[in-house]
Amino acid sequence: MRVTRALRNASQASPALRERVRRPALLNKYVADPATLVDQFKNDDYIGWSGFTGVGYPKTLPTAIADHVEQNNLQADPATKKKFNLFVGASVGPEVEDRWARLDMIERRYPHQVGKEIAKGINEGRIKFADKHLSMFPQDLTYGYYSLHKKHGNPKKPLDWAVVEATAVTEDGGIVPGASVGATPEILQSADKIVIEVNTSLPNMEGLHDINQSFLPPNRQPYLIVDPRDRIGSTSIPIDPDRVVAVIESNKPDNTGKNAPENDESRAIAKHLLEFLDKEVQEGRLPKNLLPLQSGIGNVANSIIGGLADGPFEKVQVWTEVLQDVRDIPLTFIRFFDSGKLDFATATSIRFSPNGFEHFYKNWANYKDRLLLRSQQVANSPEIIRRLGVIAMNTPLEVDIYAHANSTNALGSRMLNGLGGSADFLRNAKLSIMHTPSSRPTKTDPHGISCIVPFATHVDQTEHDLDVVVTEQGLADLRGLSPRERAPVIIEKCAHPVYRDLLHEYYDRALHECLARGAGHEPHMLRNAFKMQTHFMEKGTMKISGWD
């Protein structure tokens, strides 16, 4: 269905929108009131949104759809209830996604999410969710894997709708994203109908992006990138203008909120890591400017990047998913740039706090030639990560004594956010590093959770993927070690002192029992392997009195 010509009134468009949308035929599809589009969205539609880590997502139309559902009490009656299958490169702002989850408007969600309401819906069984390596999600979308059971709409298109935010539309109809790319190119490629939200409150970010087309096998092409500065695509996302249903003007900012602040633990972890990297340089295993860095999200990542801004390494390059800052102070990556030590950075998203974005936009000219945003399929490409020799650093929930890591499911069952891109990097990096506090507090015990455990309750990154584990207690270099050599090192270097003896006892007893029966490669006592976790579920702490 297409909207009527009465709604396509370019003369109603603001001067700012007319300046941003440079293709007249698309400006003629301007819709002043997004509410007029709501009825076109049907129950069980497959919808793709732009956005990545709460940046660059559509705000106006998703809000209008939620308003319509809530104001008309549609969810109270099975005959009128609307639930949608939602596909986004990663997470988006809570005012849209969490609201949709609270209103029970999400049937399925892929491949990564952040928000209390959507996590609640997943863990209560109301939302069907599956996480996926972020490099693989866009390609699997174009393969049609997520629409195998789609019941209506165009059978040749995996998605019924793409609703995407843009900062401009070019003369040939190309979409210029904002501060993220994510899976937007593949979502647009896969959609039958397209709605473009042009956000005129943001700068026109044309030139910041490197967009390449996604081909299907056997026609996929290599990514000809040997340096983070290399460009292989165009500055906008090509689309079929005939599939555009409407153009909407938006002026709502990204709702990024405050990022996690640094603390003593995160700074101690960063200190251990920076000393390790310096030693690698001194011993000739890394060049003086290191190799391209990838860091995840969180206060440890912030402390590491902050430490690099004050550190000895010059002309550092970054190949990562997300560039972020701390709280409302423009630190970390912005300070890293301003120090002159960060030479160039490429990512798929820039996630700054509101004040960080304000600083970034005001100083746009200082940063625009030192940054490049790519699609997540490229930013997380195993091919490129391995070729560049990326140094990957990410945070798990728990790591076991043999270096299996759990990044997603608390106590093996409760989904938090999803795998994200950590495994894309950790499996393919030259140096694969996981950093975590050695313990976390519970309601009754300041060290009630040990992040070093005998056996991870869920495994996202295997022992075959990790080179280094680091906590505020110390750093365990696992390269070249067998499982029986790794366990004592991880326990001694990384475990919190209140759990260290307990973990040593577990390993020693497991080793004795397993060697006795000729099964000593990676010793475990299965009857005790999850005793710390089950004790926590019963008593609120992992501090057990001993092993069976």
Image: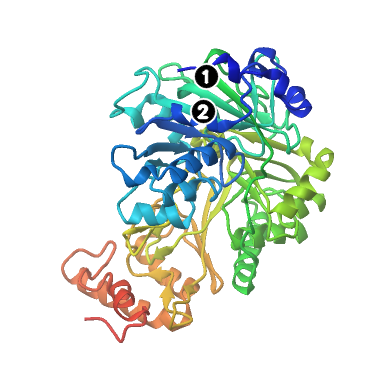
Residue assigned mark 2: 37
Residue 256 position in % (x across, y down): 62, 51
Mark 1 and mark 2: Cα distance apart in space: 8 Å
For label 1, the residue is 3
| x and y, in percent, of residue 101 in the image | 42, 49
Which element is circle 1 on? loop
**Location of the N terminus (image quadrant):** top left
Residue furthest to the front: 72
The residue under the point 31% across, 59% down is: 413
Pointer 1 local density, CA inside 10 Å: few below 14, some 14–19, many at least 20: some
From where the camera sits, is residue 211 visible? no
**Which image quadrant for residue 300?**
bottom right
User: Viewed as shown, does residue 314 lie left or right of 198?
Assistant: right
**Residue type at tag 2:** Leu
The location of residue 427, given as percent across then percent down, is: 45, 46
Q: Is residue 102 visible?
A: yes
Disc 2 element:
helix
Closer to the camera, 456 or 142? 142
Q: Earlier in the sequence, mark 1 or mark 2?
A: 1
Indicate whether 434 appears above or below 375.
below
- The residue type indicated by label 1 comes to Val
Callout 1–callout 2 Cβ contact below 8 Å = yes
Nearest the eye: 231 or 504:
231
